[in-house]
Amino acid sequence: MMGVVITDLIQISRLGEKKRGENEKFRRWIKSHNFVERQFRAAAKEVHAAIDCRECAECCRVTEAEIFEKDVVSLAKNLGISRKQFLEQYTQTGTDGELILKRTEEAGCVFLDGNDCTIYEFRPKTCEGFPHLLRGMGSIQHKMWAYVDRATYCPIVYNWMEQVKHLTNFKK
């Protein structure tokens, strides 16, 4: 059962950073124990239902959205431009050398307008699945390394981690 849901981004940032050490300890602890992933997914569904991503959009401001060829083709088609035009106007190289949607440090993703994604109906798969608690490759335990960071800016991940710590009787 879910406790108080925290959605204030300043509070999420502060608490996520404050609990970073605890969350890293939890990540290591969870990998060394066997849990039925169904309970983690149930908690994720509950948190997802309580928080509207479209009210927040912090992930669009702080993360790099990696895109793949099928995304490039779909986005170019939906924007009514050539693949070459799309690549030139809307992409850049990410910190790990991957292809990402163009972004700035100040505003985030080039397709973000306030808290609205201007390509929401045909956004890339990585954006559609974010924060990857319910969708995506690999087990939740395997993906835990990413959640420590995401808990500092994503209300869904922060609240989910707190709930899962409670569910698993994690001792801080």
Image (cartoon, helix red, strand yellow):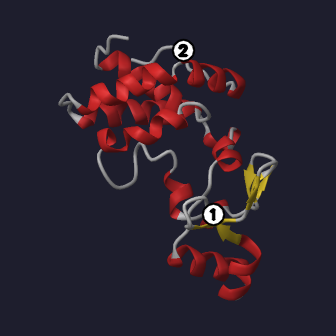
| Residue type, label 1 | Glu
Residue at the image position 69 percent from the left and 24 percent from the top? 8
Instruction: Give the image quarter of residue 84.
Output: bottom right
Mark 2 secondary-structure assignment:
loop
- The residue that label 2 is drawn on is 4
The residue at the point 54 percent across, 61 percent down is 96
Measured in 3D between alpha carbons, the distance from the residue under mark 2 to the one under mark 1, in whole angstroms, is 31 Å
**For residue 137, side relative to residue 18 (left or right):** left
Q: Residues within 10 Å of mark 2 (few under 14, many from 20)?
A: few
Q: Is residue 81 left or right of residue 1?
A: right
Q: Amino acid at mark 2?
A: Val
- The residue depicted at 41 percent of the width and 21 percent of the height is 163
- Mark 2 and mark 1 in contact? Answer it, CB < 8 Å: no
**Mark number, residue 96:** none
Say above or below: 67 vs 129: below
80 vs 94: above or below: below
User: Which element type, helix, strand or loop, lies under badge 1?
Assistant: helix
Q: Which image quadrant is residue 143 in?
A: top left
Q: Which quarter of the image is occupied by the C terminus?
A: top left
Task: Place residue 154 in its image quadrant.
Answer: top right
Q: Which residue is mark 1?
A: 121
Is 34 drawn above or below residue 123 in the view shown?
Answer: above
Check the image and report above or below for 151 versus 101.
Answer: above
Front one among 50 and 115: 115
Closest to the observer, 42 or 153: 153
Q: Residues within 10 Å of mark 1 (few under 14, many from 20)?
A: few
